[in-house]
Amino acid sequence: MNPFEYAPALESTSIVTIKDRYGLFINGKFVAPKSGKYFPTINPSTEKKLSEIALASTADVDLAVKAARVAYAKVWSKMPAAERGKYLFRIARILQERSREFAVLETLDNGKPIRESRDTDIPLAAAHFFYHAGWADKLQYSGNGSGPKPYGVVGQIIPWNFPMLMLAWKIAPALATGNTVVLKPAETTSLTALLFAEICQQAGLPNGVINIITGEGATGAELVNHPGIDKVAFTGSTEVGKLIATSIAGSKKAATLELGGKAANIIYDDAAIDEAVEGIVNGIFFNQGHVCCAGSRLLVQESIQDEVLTKLKERMALIRLGNPLDKNTDIGAINSAAQLAKIKELSAAGDAEGAERWSPACNIPADGYWFPPTIFTGVSQTHRIAREEIFGPVLSILTFRTPQEAVEKANNTPYGLSAGIWTEKGSKILWTASKLRAGVIWANTFNKFDPASPFGGYKESGWGREGGKHGLSAYLKASN
Amino acid sequence: MIIDGTESSLRAYLKTLPPVDEVGAHARAAMLATRSIKTTSKSWAIDMAISMVDLTTLEGADTPGKIGTLCAKAVRPDAMDATVPSVGAVCVYNDMVKIARTKLDAIGGTSIPVAAVATAFPSGRASFAVKAQDTKDAIDAGAAEIDMVIDRGAFLSGRYGEVFEEISQIKEICGDKAHLKVILETGELVTLDNVRKASYLAMLAGADFIKTSTGKISPAATSPVVLVMLEAVRDYYSLTKTRIGVKPAGGIRNTKDAIKQLVLVNEVAGPEWLTPKLFRIGASALLNDLLLQRMKMRDGFYAGPSYVTLD
């Protein structure tokens, strides 16, 4: 028993007021859904109900799209760009002021550790608004011609892994470029989006510029298929991304799709081992592994396999799993029962196919959805756990002998979202990066994000880029 | 034996050490600094930190009077509360050792060792004969711990054999009479790669402790430096089954900083290092802040600087 066992250090939830029931945010007001239906949203670390969320029907989606259209035509497209920028700056500042409130609510609704929502999600979300606020009146310098034009009304669907951050990635560039928005958050994590709706009111954003409709997959489909939508922006699974691509084919709708990944994290034998081990941990266990760009395939040079594995296991034994509101928690709850079932199913496939599973000793709480940090060794390219996205804290470890083999294995996937390279040799970083077919490549770090840096994938990982100048292009029709 | 002590064997061995990525090491230290230590664990950490303090005065103006009050503080840090543990050691210059030892013995501090800085501290710029004599004098006067400085000039010009040789010879002088702490002066080594190399050099040459700094150079005991040194003792243990101690010194002035150090120890080297035998904090002002925070834990309010003694 360690005498220095950290006592509970719980973040207070008193800063957050959760209503019993939430309506839809349409045309600047919270309204009851036409469907009259609501569904519960729960805290995944306790399975207790937090609130009830409106289920938007066809009629509600229609109202939201119409509100966005009117706001676009009458207000937002006519407003001087510098004025648009002011609203974005205002939203960014309010987000910073209320950051603690957002962080606690995100942790309650999503299950992620407060350390991550406090230090990563919310500060980055605010940073995205600040970054794009600055672009609003400078779009003619964004590389899209002298007078680029917005699409009009954008339908946006975001996932549950980074609810508030993904909202910022979607809404900030859409507003900066002069589009209006109908956004649907994920059904298990709508609360921060609804709190964001309050911020829109607080900032005095004109009615209808942002509309937030909650619901399930069917609601998302209604939004995508609505004829009043000019562009679709989606982040989520490749499976749903393909459905969206199919359903908008032949229409005039533009689309950006940010989909799945199975990133290779390549550790060469001349890497800084201690920091590489940190990078492996950060790559796959950050946010419970619910990260599309997670470093879920570790490719380690065979000559240092034992050393890396030993250090990785020692490091994993220190990971603190438990109450997400505890400031010392490293791994929180899995977001939903459905996701937990998927992680368990794929891990069982790893066992069945002959890979060897290892997890550190871990106290799993009685209630809630949990999965311990897990590694599989002896994984080969043919195993399902080397090919399919698990979207959980599960790492598949493969080895390679030469840089050529590392690159071949890294690229041997239908995905191509991200990759990591660990070596102290600069020339090897450049050679490897030029050969990898992935949208984002980190060298001697992993899971680093910045609003100025474009993010997006090759192949089945999606279409288009978000963030930076590239991300602006996705919301603009270029001119001469 | 990993090396035979020759220049070439040292050079070859130090080359096999994995490099340190500065950005990654800083990020890891910053993440560990977010650990929130509350209630029972905070009380435990404060007492542990007090017992790890090497209460230090290394001034040209040191006098027998000054040393005497420091020793009194070391034995009984809080005059009003006998439950406060004594500190780890008293750390002074060579010529103050006897005064400190005599005083400690006279006031019930026989178990508190006197540590002497030696080998032409802080610069280390003297002939080896002088450094050896400096060490012998301190041990003869009753020093149970020797805080020596390495020859940073030799290290930076790649003469690892010289650095190694000096440490081994001082170790030989210490014998079983004194523990040897080797000061790397990381503020002059600058890079974390150098910190790792110097840590191994000192451990291979026989250091019982590796220590960050003299306290005369800034920056001193930064978290990334302590992180890399703790990694070094951890990895050296898996190699040799010998546990080497670590002593950050310089710049650790308040309880928050001290607790951050203990978190680093806990999560990098491991809980086995959470003992004054394997971790010390070189400090002077820190002790009073630890006492004030200890009172706050006990009484529920912050007493203020008038309620701790200035020695």
Image: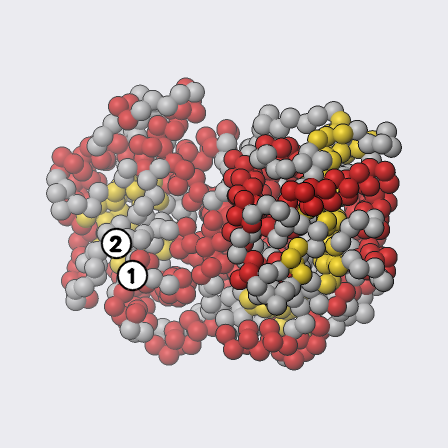
Q: In the image, residue B193 lies at what x, y percent?
A: 41, 65
Image quadrant where residue B303 sits:
top left
Q: Amino acid at mark 1?
A: Glu
Give the x, y percent position of residue A135.
54, 54
Q: Indicate the position of residue B37 as horizontal and vertical percent values.
A: 50, 35
Dot 2 crowding, Cα within 10 Å, few <14, some 14–19, many 20+: some
Chain of residue at mark 1: B
What is the number of the mark on residue B217? 2
Q: In the depicted view, which residue is nearer to us: A450 or A150?
A: A150
Q: Residues within 10 Å of mark 1 (few under 14, many from 20)?
A: some
Q: Assign the C terminus of chain B to one quadrant of the image.
A: top left
Q: Is residue B244 visible?
A: no
Image position of A356 with respect to B67: above or below: below
Tell whether label 2 touches label 1 (CB within 8 Å): yes
**Residue at 62 percent of width and 60 percent of height:** A148
Q: Residue at x 81, y 63 (%)?
A: A384
Give the residue at mark 1. Answer: B188
Q: Judge by depth and name the residue closer to the eye, A56 or A406.
A: A56
Q: Does residue B1 appear to the left or right of A139 in the view shown?
A: left
Q: Residue at x 64, y 64 (%)?
A: A478
Give the residue type that dot 2 points to.
Answer: Ile
Q: Identify the subunit bearing mark 2.
A: B
Q: Earlier in the sequence, mark 1 or mark 2?
A: 1
